[in-house]
Image (cartoon, rainbow, N blue to C red):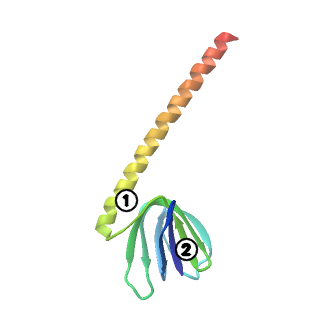
């Protein structure tokens, strides 16, 4: 089957593989050519794949969406990194740290919006 890793500006990888193992929110799962078509969310983690007759290869992804349709598995992700397992664990930690920081920033923005809404609502009540 074909494995395509897609990033926003480019095709990161386009290879023939026998098997793919990915990490989703509910845990790891494997895909082979005859499995049913599916769509799954990916968590930041390690994606493993096996080229025909070859050894296991690894890449880190910072989340994304996996779509298996027919003989093609497509993974859309913001960032992917190829490498050996030890180096990729560092990349995954960085992905998770970046995700935590973005979530913290988003919560701060929402809190400011809520405070602004309440302030305007109180001011509106005084003007009526």
Mark toward the start of the polypeptide (2 vs 1)? 2
Q: Is residue 21 visible?
A: yes
Pointer 1 residue:
92
Q: Residues within 10 Å of mark 2 (few under 14, many from 20)?
A: many
Q: Please provide percent x and percent y for residue 3.
A: 51, 75
Q: In this orientation, does residue 42 appear? A: no
| Residue 14, position as x, y percentages in the image | 49, 75
Q: Nearer the viewer, residue 83 or 56?
A: 83
Q: Going by the picture, which residue comes out furthest to the left?
A: 86
Residue shown at 33%/62% (left/top)? 89
On screen, residue 49 versus residue 73, left or right, reads left
Depth check: 106 or 41 in front?
106
Report which quarter residue 80 is drawn in: bottom left
- The quadrant in which the N terminus is found is bottom right
The residue positioned farthest toward the front in the image shown: 9
Left or right position of 125 against 52: right
Dividing the picture into quadrants, the one containing residue 74 is: bottom right
Residue at the right extreme, as displayed:
128
Question: Where does the image place residue 71, in percent across and percent down from the top left?
Answer: 59, 80
Local secondary structure at mark 2: strand
Q: Position of residue 91 (x, y in %)?
A: 34, 60
The Cα atoms of the two marked residues, 2 and 1, are separated by 21 Å
Residue 49: assigned label? none
Q: Quadrant of residue 45?
A: bottom left
Q: Which mark is residue 73?
A: 2
**Residue positioned 34% across, 70% down in the render:** 83
- Please tell me how many numbered marks the rendered image carries: 2
């Amino acid at each position: 089957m074909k494995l395509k890793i897609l990033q926003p500006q480019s095709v990161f990888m386009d290879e023939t593989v026998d098997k793919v193992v990915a990490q989703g929110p509910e845990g790891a799962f494997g895909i082979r050519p005859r499995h049913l078509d599916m769509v799954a969310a990916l968590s930041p983690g390690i994606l493993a794949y096996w080229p025909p007759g070859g050894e296991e290869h690894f890449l880190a992804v910072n989340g994304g969406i996996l779509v298996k349709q027919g003989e093609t598995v497509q993974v859309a992700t913001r960032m992917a990194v190829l490498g050996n397992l030890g180096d990729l664990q560092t990349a995954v930690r960085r992905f998770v740290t970046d995700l935590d920081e973005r979530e913290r920033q988003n919560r701060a923005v929402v809190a400011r919006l809520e405070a602004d809404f309440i302030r305007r609502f109180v001011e509106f009540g005084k003007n009526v």
